[in-house]
Image (cartoon, coloured by chain):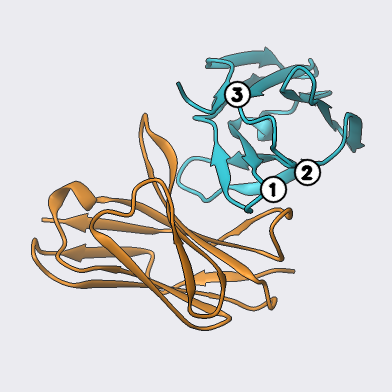
Amino acid sequence: DVKVTQSSRYLVKRTGEKVFLECVQDMDHENMFWYRQDPGLGLRLIYFSYDVKMKEKGDIPEGYSVSREKKERFSLILESASTNQTSMYLCASSLADYYEQYFGPGTRLTVT
Amino acid sequence: QKEVEQNSGPLSVPEGAIASLNCTYSDRGSQSFFWYRQYSGKSPELIMSIYSNGDKEDGRFTAQLNKASQYVSLLIRDSQPSDSATYLCAVKDNAGKSTFGDGTTLTVKP
């Protein structure tokens, strides 16, 4: 079974802090994704990566950056956290472009 | 206009009935189509994937795809209370980027 793990289930940070969210997958998947999910707004793509050191902006990249130094690990970075970044963050991976995605358990981030 | 639209919920069906969930998409170049189930407080989990026109069955679940009409649906037969969840339709384009619908919340009443 595919396993996608995220570094924290719950996280509380202060406004202005730099925040790192880490995601690891164990199935040698090519593609990895970061989403945020908010009530009424659904799942929105922040960034995705189709190879090591490669990244593409999603629909809402502003205020975020990503890093993929190793194939199995994809990190989301909030350079200076703001209260409007309070959300559920979901990482996902897929074998390749046309395949299904597998999601991690999510990190609920609160920025105060 | 949102690229992936799902029928507005919530949807309520009695136990044992058929639940029908619908989804339309705007990008004619879409290649892959998925249904995910999401329980409250949990992350989405894959139920079905479908890539070509027609029906695909897996146990009590049947996905239907009509690319000409840009329509994908999910039927759940013999609905159970454990099927109560939000169902997300996802469509992948040629670049491997997925767009999700807002979801339809299904309640199966015993």
In the rendered image of this protein, does residue B66 appear above or below residue A44? above
Amino acid type for the residue under numbered disc 1: Leu
Which residue is nearer to you in this view: A29 or B47? Answer: A29
Q: In which quarter of the image is the C terminus of chain A?
A: bottom left
In the rendered image of this protein, does residue B74 appear above or below residue A103? above
The mark closer to the camera, 1 or 3, is 1
For the residue carrying disc 3, how many other residues have a C-alpha within 10 Å: few (<14), some (14-19), or many (20+)?
A: many
Residue at (60, 23) in percent of width and height: B106
Visual hue assigned to chain A: orange
Q: What residue sits right under mark 2 in the picture?
A: B49
Q: How far apart are marks 2 and 1 (CA)?
A: 8 Å
Of label 1 and label 3, which has the lower sequence position? 1
Q: How far apart are marks 1 and 3 (CA)?
A: 16 Å
Give SS at disc 3: strand
Give SS at disc 1: strand
Residue A69 at x, y = what percent?
Answer: 47, 85
The mark closer to the camera, 2 or 3, is 2
Q: Distance between the residues labelled 2 and 3?
A: 19 Å
Q: What residue sits right under mark 3 in the picture?
A: B106
The chain ID associated with circle 1 is B
Q: Is residue A108 left or right of residue B65?
A: left
Give SS at disc 2: strand
Amino acid type for the residue under numbered disc 3: Leu
For the residue carrying disc 2, how many other residues have a C-alpha within 10 Å: few (<14), some (14-19), or many (20+)?
A: some
Decide: marks 2, 1 in contact (CB < 8 A)?
Answer: yes
Amino acid type for the residue under numbered disc 2: Ser
Of label 2 and label 3, which has the lower sequence position? 2
The mark closer to the camera, 2 or 1, is 2
